[in-house]
Image (cartoon, rainbow, N blue to C red):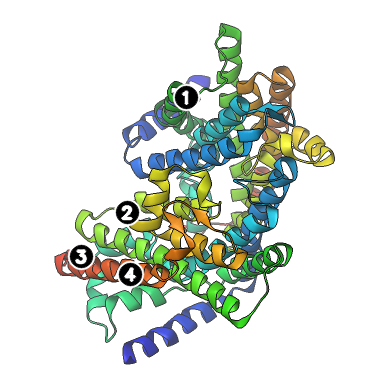
């Protein structure tokens, strides 16, 4: 628990350091907001032309997109140091030696050493999109529904961060950044921002059961929107959402520990 | 003298070719995005024939041309020039004979031509074999498409060069870059085809400087507005060249590197 408290303090300090560069922080915040803004605009214009996607209207699709972007904002903010090239440099440069001597778990140190406050821009627009989409789709914000949205964002962020950690665990062994990670993080996030029924069964199963990004967003959204969902990914899977997120995170941490044990001092 | 720049172009081509498949993960990411976006458009077109002048074949062509061009528009070496500006390594480039902008551009174009030939073409060709795409089959059509891709590579260099010149003025150049990037990508047709824009926005998009990065080559591939697209690309390549030279000349007048 002490480790966690230390990590939170370190994360806060690293984020606060960006206030020393107000121009970079402000342009970053607006940039991150715009990144979500163009996706929302895309969905609005697209469904303005087509009306519905897999039977869902623009508000329902926007709800999915908003939830995904909120989850992504946390995963990117904390996972910044795990980014493929940054992390490969940390490992191959031998700097990781020093990490092992710190009085904090190496994983928590890596996650908290460079927290990106600009991701608040993504979170803000993502949350606004959730509110707008839910309003248009007639979602009633009961306490249970608010809790469900929070659960969805938390679990989505957990799964995306776990993929990042898994990629880093591989980097310990290969010494190289694993670009495949981005296919799963950003590709998975993109897939999860569309109604799952538009995809093939194989994609649906992979992103529901194996890399459960879509599970953490689509299934809670089904309950919020009171829709039945696609075969193999119905609302009955709701209890699985936190279990799957915790499971994937556990597997990632296990792989990370194996990676750290495999790490060898590179000299100096 | 022009042979020197051609050699730089060839050197850029060779350097990038050596690492063409080092970034296999990037290629897989491209393909994955293409698959997801194809599935979305196939679902959208399930009950429709043509929307805003595009049928499902034209839209799938859009999806895969955009994926093919993305690594050219946003290459892995983005910000290399800006980093040289900030670190002072640019001083070395400045004492080299020849023209800094032409040399940088020739090397960059060489790298991007390698990307186009060895990397970007793969997902596009694969998609063309597996899906029903609308790509040109006549010699003039193929020539127009290759020209459009080449012009996109040149425009990509000019667009990035202008962005990276902000590094002469501020250490926060990445922040300003991000600010510009997303609206520019949207206008270029990265998120949805420009044909789905409202009429006013579409009129702006079709003559904008970023049209030639993605939407222009997409139109050429689809066989729509071919000559107009190429004309817009050529026009902005020329304007971009003048703009780059003016900005670089002004920036170099104020830059000071201490050396030893």
- The kind of secondary structure element at disc 2 is loop
Q: Position of residue B174 (x, y in %)?
A: 57, 58
What is the CA distance from the residue labelled 4 to the residue labelled 3?
Answer: 15 Å
Name the side, left or right, on which A194 lies relative to A33: left
Q: Nearer the viewer, residue B196 or B16?
A: B196
Using the image, determine if residue A149 lies above or below residue B158. below
Q: CA distance from mark 4 to mark 2?
A: 20 Å
- The residue singled out by tag 3 in the image is A259
Q: Earlier in the sequence, mark 4 or mark 2?
A: 2
Disc 3: CA contacts within 10 A as few (<14), some (14-19) or many (>=20): some
Judging by the rendered image, the residue that carries numbered circle 1 is B4
Identify the residue shown where x is 44% and y is 71%.
A78
- Asked if marks 4 and 3 fall on the same chain, the answer is yes
Label 2 sits on residue:
A177
**Can you tell which of label 1 and label 2 is closer to the viewer?**
2
Which corner quadrant holds the C terminus of chain A? bottom left
CB under 8 Å between discs 1 and 3: no
- Please check whether the numbered discs 3 and 2 fall on a single chain: yes
Q: Tell me which chain the residue with mark 2 is part of.
A: A
């Amino acid at each position: 628990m002490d480790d966690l408290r230390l990590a939170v303090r370190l994360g806060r300090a690293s984020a606060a350091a960006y206030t020393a560069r107000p121009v970079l922080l402000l342009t970053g915040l607006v940039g991150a907001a715009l990144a979500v803004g163009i996706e929302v605009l895309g969905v609005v214009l697209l469904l303005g032309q087509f009306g519905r996607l897999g039977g869902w209207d623009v508000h329902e699709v926007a709800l999915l997109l908003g939830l995904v972007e909120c989850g992504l904002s946390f995963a990117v903010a904390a996972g910044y140091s795990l980014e493929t090239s940054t992390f490969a440099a940390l490992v191959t440069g031998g700097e990781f030696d020093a990490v092992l001597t710190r009085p904090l778990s190496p994983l928590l140190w890596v996650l908290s050493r460079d927290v990106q406050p600009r991701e608040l821009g993504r979170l803000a627009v993502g949350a606004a999109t959730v509110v707008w989409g839910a309003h248009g789709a007639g979602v009633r914000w009961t306490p249970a529904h608010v809790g469900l949205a929070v659960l969805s964002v938390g679990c989505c962020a957990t799964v995306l961060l776990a993929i990042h950690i898994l990629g880093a665990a591989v980097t310990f062994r290969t010494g190289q950044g694993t670009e495949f990670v981005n296919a799963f993080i950003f590709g998975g996030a993109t897939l999860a921002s569309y109604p799952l029924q538009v995809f093939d069964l194989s994609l649906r199963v992979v992103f529901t059961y194996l890399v459960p990004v879509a599970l953490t967003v689509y299934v809670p959204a089904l309950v919020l929107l009171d829709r039945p969902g696609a075969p193999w990914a119905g609302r009955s899977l709701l209890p699985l959402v936190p279990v799957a997120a915790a499971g994937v995170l556990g597997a990632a941490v296990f792989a990370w520990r194996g990676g750290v044990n495999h790490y060898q001092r590179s000299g100096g | 003298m022009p042979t020197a720049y051609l050699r730089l172009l060839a050197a850029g081509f060779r350097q990038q070719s050596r690492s063409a498949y080092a970034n296999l993960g990037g290629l897989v990411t491209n393909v994955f995005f293409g698959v997801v976006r194809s599935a979305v458009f196939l679902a959208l077109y399930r009950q429709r024939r043509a929307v805003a002048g595009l049928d499902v074949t034209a839209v799938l062509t859009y999806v895969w041309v955009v994926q093919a061009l993305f690594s050219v528009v946003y290459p892995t070496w983005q910000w290399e020039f800006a980093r040289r500006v900030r670190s002072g390594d640019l001083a070395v480039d400045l004492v080299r004979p020849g023209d800094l902008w032409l040399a940088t551009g020739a090397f960059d174009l060489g790298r991007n031509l390698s990307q186009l030939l060895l990397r970007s073409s793969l997902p596009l060709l694969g998609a063309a074999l597996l899906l029903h795409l609308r790509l040109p089959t006549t010699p003039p059509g193929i020539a127009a498409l290759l020209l459009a891709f080449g012009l996109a590579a040149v425009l990509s260099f000019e667009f990035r060069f202008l962005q990276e010149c902000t590094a002469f003025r501020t250490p926060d150049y990445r922040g300003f870059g991000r600010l510009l990037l997303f609206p520019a990508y949207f206008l270029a047709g990265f998120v949805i085809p420009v044909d789905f824009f409202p009429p006013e926005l579409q009129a702006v998009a079709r003559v904008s400087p970023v049209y030639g990065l993605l939407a222009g080559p997409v139109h050429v591939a689809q066989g729509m507005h071919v000559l107009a697209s190429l004309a817009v690309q050529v026009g902005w390549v020329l304007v971009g060249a003048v703009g780059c030279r003016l900005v670089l000349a002004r920036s170099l007048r104020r830059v000071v590197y201490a050396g030893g």
